[in-house]
Image (spheres, rainbow, N blue to C red):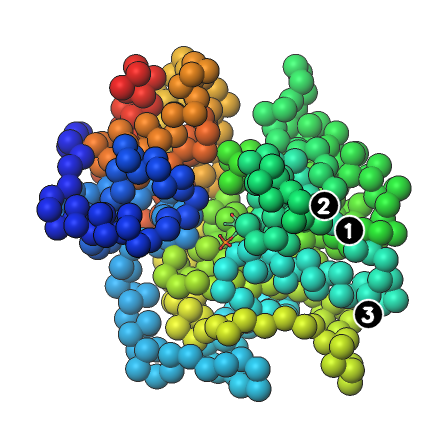
Amino acid sequence: MTVRDFAQGPVAQDWVDRSLRSVWHPCTQMQHHESLPLVAISRGQGAWLFDHDGGRYLDAISSWWVNVLGHANPRINAQLKAQLDQLEHVMLAGFTHEPVVALSEKLSELTDQTLGHCFYASDGASAVEIALKMSFHFWRNSGRAQKQEFVCLQGSYHGETLGALAVTDVQLFRDAYGPLLNRAHVAATPDARSAQPHESAAEVALRAAAQVETLLQERAGHIAAVIVEPLVQCATGMAMYDAVYLQRLRQLCDQYQVHLIADEIAVGCGRTGTFFACEQAGIWPDFICLSKGISGGYLPLSLVMTRDEIYQGFYSSDVSRGFLHSHSYTGNPLACRAALATLQIFEEDNVLAQNQDRAKRLSEALKPLAQHERVQHFRHKGMIWAFDVEVEKPMEAEFARRCFMRGLEHEILLRPIGTSVYLMPPYCLDEEETQHLADSTLAVVEQVLDGR
Ligand SMILES: *Cc1c(COP(=O)(O)O)cnc(C)c1O
């Protein structure tokens, strides 16, 4: 395994300096960059990112979970280039185009036509806003305007615009922006890690679902929808839970006439092993939000899929009964083309089946980490691996940043969430890359635990 001192040459350093003066980076306390490196990337290829100085980093987290089929994928590139010469963009009100129609039909097919209507936006948070608004507006159109409240889960993350933050349970955000939010009900997480002694993951899930039932018994008349990330709550530390939770939730939502919104922005597109995570529970929600991987990680694209019954609830001669929502770049043809190219590769290469082999190889290579004495709750679902590292208190706040820095030296891009380390690689790792990923992750964790 190569270990390379992380250092940037003069060209890269110039970009970094200029970036720090002019670009306000997301999810970043900018002052940390006084000691934390900012890395200037010049190109990507497959699972790798390259800097200006011959350094390379295995993208172990698919660049914030978006890049599912590798960087600069030649097949996606070719289709995008052709689309670029054909039509770069046209507004989607009053107009339509082949890529958006083909994509909507394809996605609908993937749900056996159950969720046959696609509404488009550009980022994940907007998709969540759309699902919330659509649910509320549907009930209003049905003469039940008092259904205005939402239920989310403890440890949920659904994006950072105000509507999405209202259904997000992250202490840091709540402390900062709470006064601006119309907060949702927060129900217990089905996180399998919260099992009591001798309790199975399914029992934890059913215990959590019982709490939702109590809430619905009391307030269903005021509740429009429950929003969940199916199978894995990603952004708050890859909390995995039993599929029986989704089955129970589906029953409860039917029983109490409340919508079920599945935020598959992170878990969709094959990440948990099936194309949609909900498939593993054998249920369909009333709304699915997709973004991140759907465009192969190429272009901002998000969408909400819903049932015909919901669609019909808006169908009328009255403008105010129509769904009132739009974005300038809704259904952008380039982004839709990237999505179509991505879905075509899923089909042609049988990506989901191949991922089973990839997952087996990586799980095998990660055994030394899984057995490490300071590693707890090693968990895995589809193409997501995660574990919690037992870190001494004073190190906790620093842990993630140190892993990131040590990762650069070990040619890997890692961004733990607190003390939970996770891997969400693109679906293109070969055997050598798989070994590199496992070896580097172990080396990084050991170094950081050693106080380096
Ligand atoms: C990333 C994410 C979002 C927000 O998507 P953005 O494109 O970042 O706005 C919403 N929900 C989940 C589950 C996500 O992982």
Where on the picture, by quarter, is residue 344? Answer: bottom left
Label of residue 343 in the image: none
The answer to whether residue 315 is visible is no
Q: Give how far apart the Cα atoms at labels 2 and 1 are.
A: 6 Å
Disc 1: which residue:
149
> Reading the chain from its start, which is encountered first: label 2 or label 1?
1
Q: Which of marks 3 and 1 is nearer the N terminus?
A: 3
**Mark 2 in CB contact with mark 1 (< 8 angstroms):** yes
Identify the image quadrant of the N terminus: top left
Q: What residue type is labelled 3?
A: Asn
- Count neighbours of disc 3 (C-alpha within 10 A) and say few if under 14, some if 14 to 19, many if 20 or more: some
Give the number of the mark in front: 3 or 1.
Answer: 1
Q: Residues within 10 Å of mark 2 (few under 14, many from 20)?
A: many
The residue wearing badge 3 is 141
* Location of the C terminus (image quadrant): top left
Which amino acid does the dot numbered 2 rest on?
Answer: Ala
Q: Earlier in the sequence, mark 3 or mark 2?
A: 3
Where disc 1 sits, the SS reads: strand
Residue at image x 30%, y 16%?
A: 451
Q: Mark 2 points at which residue?
A: 184
